[in-house]
Each structure stands twice: as C-alpha cells, then as structure tokens.
Image (cartoon, rainbow, N blue to C red):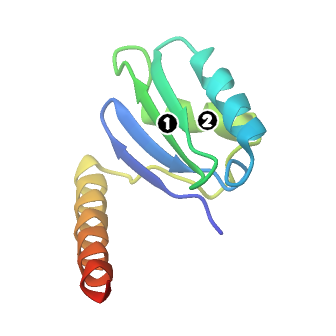
Amino acid sequence: MTDYIHALDGRMRIKITAVKGSPAIAEEVTGYLLGSHGIVEVNANPITGNVLVLYDTSHLSQGRILLLLKEAGYLQKSAQVPATPGDGLVSVLARAVMETALQSMVMALI
C-alpha cells in the first residue's frame, strides 16, 4: 500500500502505512508531530492508518510537514503534496464524490 495525502491549507490527511494496525506507532507519530512548532492538533488512527494534521500556515507549510515525516522514516519517499492548490482541491473533491457514491451503494445493499 502506498502513502497518500489530502491537503488543504492548515489541514492534511496523510495515509501512513506504519500507523495502520499499530496504536504504538500512532502515538509515536502524534507525539513527534506535536513536538513541532506550528502543529495545532494531530489525530493518528491505527485502524485506518490515517493521520490528520491541523497546523498554523504562518509557521509551517505542507512540504515542511512531509519533510519532517519523511526524515523520521514515517513516509515513503514517493509521498507528495499535489503541485498546485487547484490539483489538490480537484483531488479532494473527486475523492469525496467517490467516497459518497461508494457509501450510497453500500447502504443500498444493506
């Protein structure tokens, strides 16, 4: 499984494969990020492997957060934030539409 990132200014959701199934690593990532100036909140979910990071854009950039995670060995080298804000928004919207459609299909089957 590869890492993926959904990013908006001040908010990132990052899939970190090492977090999935490991509450200890989830806590480790949370503590590591909270130790960085500008990180407001971190929620690492060991069930999904998703790490939600809320941060102050006047102190940190998305690229800097990714660099911190890569340097600590939590992210694969290929993980990247979309190059432009428009690309990121399109990706986030497309994902949201697909998730909503999938949820609707599952609910219809139940």
Residue drawn 61% across and 35% down?
67
Q: Secondary structure at mark 1?
A: helix
Q: Residue furthest front?
A: 110
Residue drawn 24% across and 54% down?
89
Q: Quadrant of residue 71 in the image?
A: top right
User: Would residue 54 be found to the left or right of residue 101 on screen?
Assistant: right
Q: Secondary structure at mark 2?
A: helix
Viewport quadrant of the N terminus: bottom right
Q: Which mark is residue 37?
A: none
Mark 1, Cα crowd under 10 Å, few <14 / some 14-19 / many 20+, is: few
| Mark 1 lies on residue | 63
The kind of residue on which mark 2 rests is Leu
| Mark 2 lies on residue | 67
Q: Nearer the viewer, residue 25 or 7?
A: 25
Q: Are marks 2 and 1 in contact (CB under 8 Å)?
A: yes
Residue drawn 45% across and 49% down?
81
